[in-house]
Each structure stands twice: as C-alpha cells, then as structure tokens.
Image (cartoon, rainbow, N blue to C red):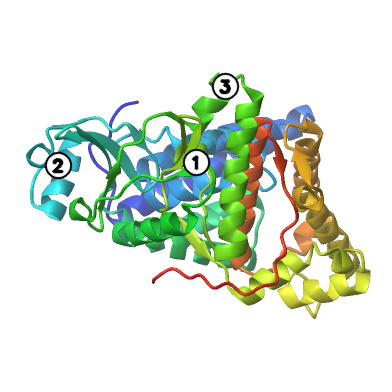
C-alpha cells in the first residue's frame, strides 16, 4: 500500500475531509433512494457497499480517532451491516503507513536521535500499522525489537475528530445524539489513554505480571529506556498473528488449546482483576511454539465493582428466570427508564432477555462449541432484526452504562476469535460477586 507522507493535523483540514465524506454519503443515499423510486427495487446493499468504502477511505487517511472507531465498530457484527464490518476490519492492517522521514522526525523529537543511531538495523517500512501508530522491527547486538511509533498529531485531534464523526455515525447507524454521546465519550477516554505510550508501558508490565501464571500465555519484555509517550519498545515476538494462524492451522486440538488460552486470559482479567485488555482483534495476538503471545495493551478498561456485579447478575438463573427480578435489574442498570411506557417496557424487556440469553449462552454450560455456525447465525439474525426494528429505533434514547461498551465489544471480539478457531472450550459460568482486589496504577 502506498505510504503517506503526511497526515492532516489542523482541525480545519481534518474537518473538511470528514465533512466531504459525509456529503458523499448523502449523495450515495440520494442515489439509493432515487434508484429505488424509479425501479422499485431495494438497493440498500449497494448503498452500504459504497458508503462503507467511502467512510473507510477517509478514516484511514486521517488515522487516529476516526480509524480507531472504524476498527472498534468492525468487531461488533450486531451493530453494523456486513459491508461495514468487511470494510472497517481493514483498519486492523490496511491503513496506509507513514513514510520513513516522518518516523525519523518522531524519533528525533522523542529520543533525541534517529533510529540509525540507536539500533544496528531498523526497517524503513512499517511491518504493521493501524489507527494510533505503526510498528517497525529493529535489531541491536543480536536482539530483535518491535517498536511502535505513534502517528503525528493523533493525540491532539481525538476530541475534534470524534465531534465531527458524530453526525456521520448518527446518519449511518440511525442513532440519536443521546444514544451516541456516552459511546463517544467512552471512546474518547480510551483513545486518549491509548496515545500515552508510557501509560501503556506501565499497564503492560502490570497486567503481564498479574497474568503470567496462566497456562500457555506469554508476554514480550518491555524496554522503558527506549520508550516515551510516543514511542514504545518491546521484544520482537516471532510466530504468526492470529488470523494467519486461522488460515494455516489444520490441527483442531491445537486450535482448541489456543482458544482456551484466549478464554482463560479474558476470564481471569474480567472476573478476577476487573481490569482487562479491551482490544481483542487478531493482530494483537501471535502464536509461537504453540503458545499464545499477547502483544498490545494499548486499550485497557477497568470495571467498577457495582457495574460488574449488576451486569453479570443478569445471567444468574435466579434473576434471568424471574421476570420481575430481571426487569428490576434492567431499571437499576439503566436499560429501562422510568418514563418508558408499558408497551416500551414489554418490548425492551423481551429484547434484553433475548440478548442476555444469546450472549451468556457460552457461560451456561461446562463446554461450548464455537465452531457451531448456527450460534453465530442467531447472533447475526438478532442484530439484523433489532437494527431494522422501527419500534426500537423510536426508543433509541440513552440507555445503559457506558462501562458496558468496551465489555460488550470485548466479548463480541472474543467470541469471533473463538469462532474463527472453531474451538470447543471450557466456559464455566463465572461467579461474579466477589470484590476485586486488583487495580492498575493510574
């Protein structure tokens, strides 16, 4: 892919790019509506295909908040039509890399020297890249390093970018301002954290230490002396990123083993630490010597104990199978609101009950077969039905807790990874009611 020699930094230039993308979405919509009026044929799929490509093209050039939002949304197949999932998933690997002179400039400003002065060799082309930064491979005295270099201007543009993306997202995904504001606020907080590589360094070391006992889970070493707020240096990990492993592997027992390691990793962090790696896309994991390596702790989410207890109590049999208790908890969590009409309460209770049933199904048995495609068809069907339900759209006000955004996203991502592995896993239901004794430093 062609390298970028610059990224629009000024908010007016970035705003112009996003506004132009929004205008092109409007043109696509008019074409879609006009064609339907003339031919009587439904062309929604064509609209989504064109719009998804248009949005991703703009987001990938701007990087930062817009591209990260695309990356996140691509992991939730219940939220987006399939064309957006396919196009936005390119954010994992296909964002145009920055040219080497810009990388050198970042090294000069952050570490006071170009890469050539610090390493015996340094790849001039990025070996991986996504929304916040790109990765280069380096070598010094026989030791291999992975060096993450942040894109210039990303940290300074997050707030203004998300403010501009908001109306575009509302138009695309049929959300009102009250619904999308908590989501964008949570995204902004996590993204701001992700741009501080020193914070990521501390979290990486802390979470690796608290998770090192897990079977067949490994973590790279980190190098504070070669790390700053904009550069993060760690050991290079050999092996295959997880989606390459999906494509090559024919050993189902090994796939089950890797899947179990993934499940146990998230189970431990969510239910014991209450602090978890919240970015489960394939590029953040490698398989080497039949072990799972965790590469990136840029996005980390801490769960307040009260929210955690309420969220996982929804799947407790005594509550889930007792309509009155289930509904009372929905009010406490904020999924039902005091001014909802009786009709709305019935509609939403049924939807949330079905949602909890689907998402908690792996927890309800000793083992779960993520190779069962019928389960993922149920999830997709649920997403299609709720997304196109006019009644639900009319009730699309702010509901729930923003803390659920990354937790839901993480479980969707975990399920998708386990599904790609076709893994059969031990998934005993967690016992969620003990307070956490673990917290990360701020």
Which residue lies under the disc numbered 2? 104
Query: Are the two marked residues, 2 and 3, in contact with CB atoms closer than 8 angstroms?
Result: no
Q: CA distance from mark 3 to mark 1?
A: 33 Å
Please tell me whether residue 282 is drawn above or below residue 16 in the rendered image. Answer: above
Count numbered badges in the picture. 3
Tell me where residue 192 sits by quadrant.
bottom left
Please give the name of the residue rendered at 79% of the width and 54% of the height, measured from the top-left corner. 355
Foreground disc of the pair 2, 3? 3
Give 138 or 430, whichever is nearer the viewer. 430
| Residue at the image point whose x is 36% and y is 40% from the top | 61
Identify residue for label 3.
249
**Is 196 positioned to the left or the right of 162 in the image?**
left
Relative to 104, 172 lies left or right: right
- Assign a secondary structure to mark 3: loop
Residue under label 1: 55
Q: Left or right of 342: which side holds 316?
A: left
Q: 178 or 212: which is nearer to us? A: 212
Label 1 crowding class (10 Å Cα cut-off): few <14, some 14-19, many 20+?
A: many
Residue at 65% x, 72% y: name it: 307
Q: CA distance from mark 2 to mark 3?
A: 38 Å
Residue 365, horizontal then vertical, whole percent: 81, 48
The image position of residue 376, as x and y in percent, is 75, 38
């Amino acid at each position: 892919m062609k390298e970028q020699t610059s990224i629009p930094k000024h908010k007016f230039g970035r705003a112009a790019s996003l506004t132009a993308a929004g205008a092109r979405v409007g043109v696509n919509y008019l074409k879609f509506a006009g064609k339907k009026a003339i031919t009587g044929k439904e062309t929604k799929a064509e609209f989504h295909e064109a719009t998804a490509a248009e949005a991703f093209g703009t987001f990938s050039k701007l990087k930062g908040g817009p591209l990260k939002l695309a990356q996140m949304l691509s992991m939730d197949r219940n939220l987006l039509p399939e064309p957006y999932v396919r196009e936005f998933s390119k954010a994992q690997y296909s964002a145009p890399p920055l040219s080497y002179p810009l990388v050198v400039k970042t090294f000069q400003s952050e570490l006071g020297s170009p890469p050539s002065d610090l390493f015996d060799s340094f790849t001039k082309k990025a070996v991986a890249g996504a929304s916040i930064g790109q990765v280069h491979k380096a070598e010094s005295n026989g030791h291999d390093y992975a060096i993450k270099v942040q894109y210039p201007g990303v940290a300074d543009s997050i707030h203004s970018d998300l403010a501009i993306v908001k109306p575009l997202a509302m138009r695309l995904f049929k959300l009102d301002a009250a619904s999308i504001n908590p989501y964008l606020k949570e995204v902004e907080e996590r993204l701001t954290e992700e741009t501080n590589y020193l914070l990521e360094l501390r979290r990486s070391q802390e979470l690796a230490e608290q998770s090192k006992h897990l079977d067949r889970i490994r973590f790279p070493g980190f190098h504070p002396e070669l790390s700053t707020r904009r550069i993060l240096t760690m050991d290079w990990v050999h092996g295959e990123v997880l989606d390459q492993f999906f494509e090559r592997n024919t050993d189902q027992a090994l796939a089950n083993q890797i899947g179990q390691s993934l499940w146990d990793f998230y189970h431990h962090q969510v239910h014991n630490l209450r602090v978890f790696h919240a970015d489960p896309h394939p590029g953040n994991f490698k398989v080497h010597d039949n072990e799972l390596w965790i590469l990136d702790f840029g996005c980390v989410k801490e769960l307040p104990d009260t929210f955690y207890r309420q969220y996982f109590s929804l799947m407790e049999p005594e509550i889930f199978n007792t309509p009155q208790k289930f509904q009372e908890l929905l009010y406490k969590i904020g999924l039902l609101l005091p001014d909802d009409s009786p009709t709305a309460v019935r509609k939403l209770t049924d939807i949330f009950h079905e949602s909890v049933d689907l998402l908690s199904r792996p927890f309800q048995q000793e083992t779960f077969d993520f190779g069962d495609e019928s389960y993922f068809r149920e999830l997709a069907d649920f997403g299609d039905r709720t997304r196109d339900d006019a009644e639900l759209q009319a009730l699309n006000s702010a509901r729930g807790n923003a803390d659920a955004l990354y937790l839901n996203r993480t479980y969707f991502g975990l399920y998708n990874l386990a599904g790609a592995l076709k893994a059969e896993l031990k998934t005993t239901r967690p016992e969620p009611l003990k307070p956490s004794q673990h917290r990360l430093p701020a």
